[in-house]
Amino acid sequence: MITGLKPSKLKRDYVGCRVMTTCIFKTPLAIIPAYTEATITYHSARGSDLTFDPCPHCGIRQKVSHVKSGFVFISYGEKNI
C-alpha cells in the first residue's frame, strides 16, 4: 500500500499539489498506469482534475477530470508551503 502526505483539510488548497495514482485510469484516448505522477489543476465538489506529465514515448499530456479517489499526495503546491 502506498502512503503519501496528509492532504490539506481545505479542498481548495489541493490545486497545484503533486499526486501519484494508485490504480489504473482508463480514458477513451489512453490507459494511464498506476504509480504515474500528476498535478491537480482544478478541484470541485465532483472531484479533482489531474493533468499527467507528458508520456516519454509519444509526448501526449493526458488530463482526467472528476477524480474522487485513486491517488495519494506526494508534494504540496507552491502556494501551500
Image: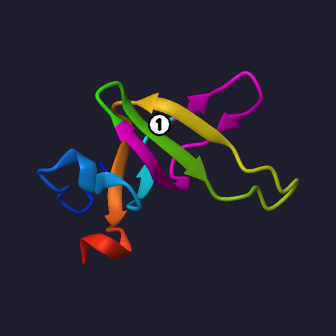
Residue in the foreground of this view, choosing between 65 and 12: 12
In percent of width and height, residue 55 lies at: 76, 55
In this view, which residue lies farthest toward the right? 58
Which residue: 15% across, 50% down? 10
Q: Quadrant of the C terminus?
A: bottom left
Lateral position of residue 59 relative to residue 7, left or right: right
Q: Residue at x 62, y 41 (%)?
A: 63
| Above or below, 26 relative to 37 | above
Q: Which residues are magenta?
A: 24-43
Q: Residue at x 35, y 24 (%)?
A: 46
Q: Residues within 10 Å of mark 1 (few under 14, many from 20)?
A: some
- The residue wearing badge 1 is 23
**Residue 1, percent from left and from top:** 30, 48
Q: Position of residue 34 (x, y in %)?
A: 53, 44
Residue drawn at 88 percent across, 53 percent down: 58
Image-based side of 4 in relation to 65, left or right: left
| Residue 32 higher or lower than 16, as above or below | above
Q: Amino acid at mark 1?
A: Cys
